[in-house]
Amino acid sequence: MITTIALGIVTIVFLCFGLITFYMKSYLPELPFEGMTKKQVYEKITNNNSIIYLTNSKGYNWYIYQGNQKDGRNEIIKRFNTLGIVFKEQLGAGIIFTSNNNKDEIIVESEMWTGKYIIFQVPDAVKF
């Protein structure tokens, strides 16, 4: 009888812990910026293959893209092209753009947040 009650209590505790973890999205990796929770970021994500603005933190605009790295890179290149900023090259997770007739370089860092999402760190001077 006592073991049945103890087992029931343990089950309820684990169930509550699991629901809280799922609701708060605490199973997701840490974010590379401050100012938003994982839950807030997850709620902004849509399934439309577009780059979504998240926040501005420490001199950078942060964006997220749902998809693979190649498609995310192509999407960010399209966004920069609309501003007249041209793709130069990719070095690892960094994407280098040039503007003003190749005089200024802009470096965008990217990182896989999970297997499905890429987070881009764009300098504050660039907004789209």
Image (tube, helix red, strand yellow):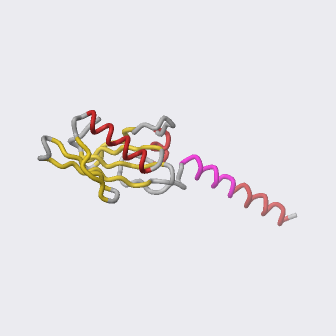
Q: Is residue 17 left or right of residue 56?
A: right
Query: How many labels, in total?
Result: 0
Q: Position of residue 119 (x, y in %)?
A: 39, 49
| Camera-side residue of 55 and 49 | 49
* Part of the protein shown in magenta: 14-24
Q: Is 11 one of the magenta-colored residues?
A: no
Q: Residue 17 magenta-drawn? A: yes
Residue 109 picture location, percent across and down = 31, 53
**Residue 48: x %, y % from top left:** 48, 35
Which of the two residues, 50 or 43, is positioned nearer the viewer here? 50
**Residue 105 located left or right of residue 10:** left
Q: Which SS does the magenta portion mostly show?
A: helix
Residue found at the far right of this picture:
1
Q: Is residue 102 left or right of residue 69?
A: left
At 41% from the left and 53% from the top, the residue drawn is 31
Residue 3 position within the rendered picture, expressed as x and y whole percent measured from the top left? 83, 66
- Tell me where residue 72 sits by quadrant: top left
Q: Quadrant of the N terminus?
A: bottom right
Q: Is residue 104 left or right of residue 126?
A: left
Q: Quadrant of the C terminus?
A: top left
Residue at point 30%, 54% (across, down): 90
Please tell me which residue is depicted at 44% across the width and 47% down the height of the picture. Answer: 37
Residue at x-position 31% and y-position 49%: 121
Locate residue 93: give its quadrant.
bottom left
